[in-house]
Image: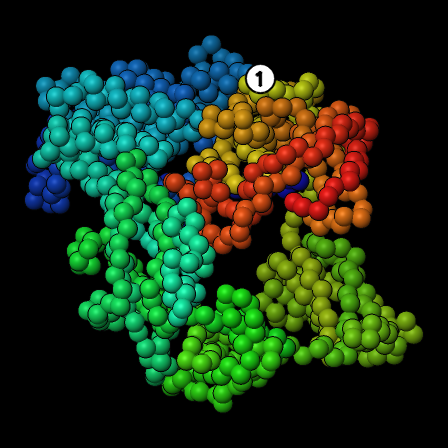
Amino acid sequence: QGSARAPRASGGASPPEDFTTWDLPRLFAEIDKQFQKALASTDTLKKTPVATFDDILQKGTLPDNYRPTLYDFIAHEALKFYASGEQAAAKSEDDFELSAGSSIFDDAEKFIAWDPGSRRRQEADKAGGPKTANPPPDVGGYDKDSPISKAVRLYQDLLKFHQNDKDRSAFIDDDIARLAYGYNIAFGEEKNARYKAALKALVDKWADHELSAFALHHWARVVQSEEEFVEARKIALSGANAFPNSAGGKLCRNLIAEIEAKSVAVTTERVWNCQRRAGVPPAQTQVDSKGRRDASPTLEVRYRNVTNIYFRAVPYDWNIFLQKNHSRSESLNETERKELLAKQATLEWSANLPATPDYRERAEALPAPDQLKSGFYFLIASHKSDFSETDNQITFADIWVSDLALVLRPRDGQIEGFVLEANSGEPVAGAEVMAWRLDNQGNRVPHPALTTDENGFFTFKANQNQSYLFRARHNGRELGSQQEYSAYDYERQRTYNQTIFFTDRAIYRPGQTIQYKGVCLRVDQEKDNYEVLAGRELTVVFADPNNKEIARQKHRCNDYGSFSGSFTAPRDRLMGTMRIYVTQGSTGQANVNVEEYKRPKFQVALDAPKTATKLNDKVSLTGHAMSYTGAAIDGAKVKYRVVREVRWPYWWGWYDSWRRRSIPASQEITHGAIATDTGGSFKIEFVAKPDPKVSEKDEASFSFSIYADVTDTAGETRSAQRSINVGFTALQTTLSVGDWQTEDKPVEAGITATTLDGEPQVAEGSVKIYRLKQPDKVHRHYLGGISDYHAGPTPQNPDLSNPNWWELGELVDEKGFTTDTNGNARLSVKLAVGV
């Protein structure tokens, strides 16, 4: 759906003297005017060395030969203004835009000769614009006064000015700046490739000049953003080695340091149930392929550029966290961290980590030790053996080593819990449970101890707006809660009275009559009883957006509990959302909008393509702009854009979600400007190109969303949108079946076959049913995901706690199917117990 937009005047009366009252377009126009005045005396500025003004200009860190004249100084200050992000807010509707396929990334000679308006004049001719023999450069959507076109002309003039300089520094610096500006402003899929190619050509041409290191830094940054860290480091290293003392060489060295920076983060379970028990030697506990014992949790280490990690388990008194004004255990201050590093550790150990030669983050699962006795500890991790703070990342995590499990939940104003044997799940009867709350002075106030019943269960009556910390003890074992818990007593809603309002419309113009009707009810949700309130008296108030009363009326409900009335939408105050509500009587309200709006005069529609769309084919859509009387809207401007979005199969969420991180969710692949013909029609064409990062074997499809905004000669704009789904295959099928089945009944499965746009199709196929290979034991669920280079499980490191990751076993059955005209089919198969 579109909306009508009134054209906004930018000229006319002179602006007020107080610039603080100017809007952004007016403010930017004035700044632009001053820059144009400053650049007007071009010949004089180009002959004036910038060093002449050393006494009043703040000296920079780069040599003057990069910006040798006053013209260079002012031009680059103007370019900073034209390239500022705030320009987008002041952009006009027909603002010039740069395509990555334009000459912005050509070599300097072609760029200098480039006429940015030539292509737009051709587009104007195609769209029905002026067809003069030699149209001016600002015809057909090329706005010569736009910030982008002014910046392009400035770069062209700077390069032309320094094209034949004996010292090539200013020319090369301007050329690098021009390419960087194009990379930040241009649009199109080929932007990165063209930018990198242009920088490479520049580096090859000026390899003996120190500014080539600047170009290498820009080049390496783009490659780094593509997560090709080895290649980015190689490019940056060439710049750092070629000109180590130059500004560009130093930037390259900084980039190398970023890529080579070390990082470590450790995640683990908060409660370890892996302490050694009397009479159970370690040799009798089962160990998996990664060296983890049955009950042993894992230490999940995410790291980069590190090959060793060192751990310390430091015992700590959990009761310290009950002292006044002390934060919880996960919030240590700097002093406490240093104290922990100075304390004697109960256990120290280390592990070797696989190298990360590609400089990408990697994750590894390490087994937790089982030598710790029950108690509370801080686990400290470091990638330096001495745990020194210089060039090191030290992480702290609080853990309990305990056989107990403390399960808590808030419920109906109480906090309920269980104390259990962690390894077996058996209840612990007779356990002592303590609770503490914080008072207004920051003191932990204890509550009387509770004792668990034969089911290990306890109930704690909590005060409203209070948080509690818990600790369980039993036979010398103890365990504290991970967090503070609160419970709120949500009272059951009592019987109440309510007024329901209805208005004849949702939006009104000033001066129009607002008709309303109301019904008064008594509501008893608990008994599911609703009654009208006959004869009830009430007062209805009409209020503006600032909640100031406009008018009020008194009513008495009829025998059906209803009443009606009217207000007049005001003309003398702020427009917006206004409120009709009951101030005396059964509460209730309704919101209405009062606006100076204009009814739309025409509508826009986009037809579906006449032929089936295939990837890499040209797609053609016809649009229509028609008035509500049926007349064509001819000569209207049409601005369109096409956005591509990757649509993954639903089952990708099971195990391949990590691969989606490097692929953008959506990307604009083209946009343009055309015009409607005499019949009010227009045509949008584009190539349905797939994302090059998506492989055909991924079975993804692509949704191309086409957006068209049509503006008529009166300035009214209406919009339309249509999506087209295209994939490597033409059909998609879904299989649905209940998760839980019983042996006495056959499994009923539903099959649906549709096009990618959801249209049902008659199709034939087969369904194969496999028995899954169940793991030999129950596996713990990953805390944050373990993989070689990404978060989440992968085929190399499957999550065996999830049946979707289990391997296929024997083929149990295979059945064919044929869907009906609605695209549906049913299957019934008898299966034995299993997964």
**Considering depth in this image, is 617 or 282 the residue closer to the camera?**
282
**Considering depth in this image, is 540 or 11 the residue closer to the camera?**
540
- Write the residue at 29% across / 39% down: 356
Image side of residue 580 versus residue 666, left or right: right
In the rendered image, residue 831, in percent from the top left (x then y), is placed at 74, 41
Q: Quadrant of residue 164?
A: top left
- Write the residue at 30% across / 35% down: 358
Image side of residue 443 versus residue 169, left or right: right
Q: Residue furthest bottom?
A: 448
Give the residue number, with chain letter if any, for mark 1.
617
Q: Quadrant of residue 623?
A: top right
- Residue 512 showing in the rendered view: yes
Quarter of the image with the N terminus in it: top right
Quarter of the image with the C terminus in it: top right
- Write the residue at 31% across / 25% down: 196
Q: Element type at marker 1?
A: loop
Please determine whether, in this image, residue 663 is positioned above or below residue 446: above
In the rendered image, residue 262, in percent from the top left (x then y), is placed at 25, 47
Amino acid identity at mark 1? Asp
Q: Number of numbered discs present?
A: 1
In the rendered image, residue 120, in percent from the top left (x then y), is placed at 46, 20
Image side of residue 654 versus residue 593, left or right: left
- Packing grade of label 1 (10 A; few <14, some 14-19, many >=20) is few
